[in-house]
Image (cartoon, rainbow, N blue to C red):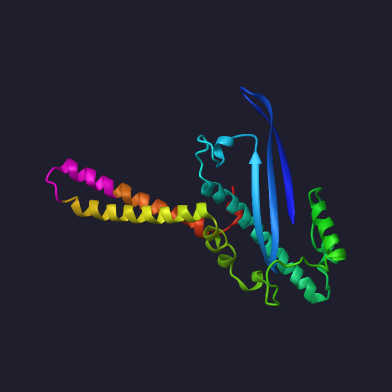
């Protein structure tokens, strides 16, 4: 299943005047198994294109940095979908064999964008045996949202980093640089007391502090490739 979304934003810039910013988002979703979906998303926009990754020499933003932003969106969607999945499961246990029949009663779908979802649910109920044709092996085990912890559900490393060449390479590079800065910190600390001149000692101490700070910063940035806890109240 695929879907696309066009977002238009009217804005006025000091030099260029009135502008219509457009964002295109296309999503390809493959149902792998109950509770598991493979999602491939591509996007484009007609503004601030220099901040988007690409092959041009002026597109200096790496692809893995763009994925940091998109992963925040996926984490938020994952939380919503987990809760929705649990509600659907409870309704099924109460006696409603087909959630698609009561979908409008147990969900709030007031916007025009919800029409596609409602149409798809209706089509799935009538022609799809109330469930998609699973791409992978469909087992009757428990749904992931009912047995996995929040940490496991939002695991970026297993779900994305290992399968993305850009993020996987950046993660390995961050680890290597962190180790180098740790070694540099140890060397600077060990040699700080050797010179007799105080200004040289001060420089070595400053370099030790700088390298340790960079090592810590790299360690914290690596969390974007592994796991970042999602707290909706803290999202900008």
Q: Measured from the top left, where is residue 61 in percent x and y?
A: 51, 41
Q: Measured from the top left, where is residue 175 in percent x and y?
A: 40, 56
Question: Who's the residue at 52% across and 49% down the image?
Answer: 64
Farthest-out residue, left: 196
From the viewer's perspective, is 39 left or right of 128? left
Q: Does the stretch in magenta take in 132?
A: no
Q: Measured from the top left, where is residue 226 in percent x and y?
A: 50, 60
The magenta stretch is 194-208
> With respect to residue 78, does 191 lie above or below?
above
Answer yes or no: is residue 104 visible.
no
The foreground one among 168 and 142 is 168
Farthest-out residue, top: 15
Quadrant location of the N terminus in the rendered image: bottom right
Question: Who's the residue at 55% across and 59% down the image?
Answer: 163
The foreground one among 63 and 205 is 63
The foreground one among 167 and 218 is 167
Farthest-out residue, right: 126
Q: Does the stretch in magenta take in 196?
A: yes
- Count of numbered circles in the view: 0
Q: Measured from the top left, where is residue 154 in percent x and y?
A: 58, 62
The foreground one among 223 and 26 is 26
Answer yes or no: is residue 232 visible.
yes
């Amino acid at each position: 299943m695929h879907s696309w979304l066009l977002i238009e934003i009217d804005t006025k810039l000091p030099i260029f005047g009135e502008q219509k910013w457009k964002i295109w988002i296309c999503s390809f979703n493959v149902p792998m198994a109950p509770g598991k979906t493979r999602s491939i998303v591509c996007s484009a926009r007609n503004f601030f294109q220099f901040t988007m990754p690409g092959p041009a020499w002026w597109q200096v933003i790496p692809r893995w940095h763009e994925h940091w932003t998109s992963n925040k969106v996926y984490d938020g969607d994952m939380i919503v979908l987990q809760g929705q999945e649990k509600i659907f499961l409870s309704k099924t246990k109460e006696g409603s064999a087909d959630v698609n029949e009561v979908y409008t009663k147990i969900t709030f779908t007031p916007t025009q964008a919800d029409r596609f979802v409602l149409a798809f649910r209706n089509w799935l109920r009538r022609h799809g045996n109330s469930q998609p044709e699973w791409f992978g092996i469909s087992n009757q085990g428990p749904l992931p949202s009912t047995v996995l912890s929040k940490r496991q559900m939002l695991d970026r490393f297993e779900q994305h980093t290992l399968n993305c060449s850009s993020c996987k390479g950046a993660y390995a590079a961050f680890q290597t640089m962190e180790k180098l800065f740790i070694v540099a910190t140890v060397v600077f600390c060990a040699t700080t007391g050797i010179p007799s001149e105080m200004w040289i000692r001060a420089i070595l101490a400053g370099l030790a502090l700088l390298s340790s700070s960079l090592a810590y910063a790299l360690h914290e940035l690596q969390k974007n490739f592994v796991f970042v806890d999602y707290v909706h109240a803290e999202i900008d």
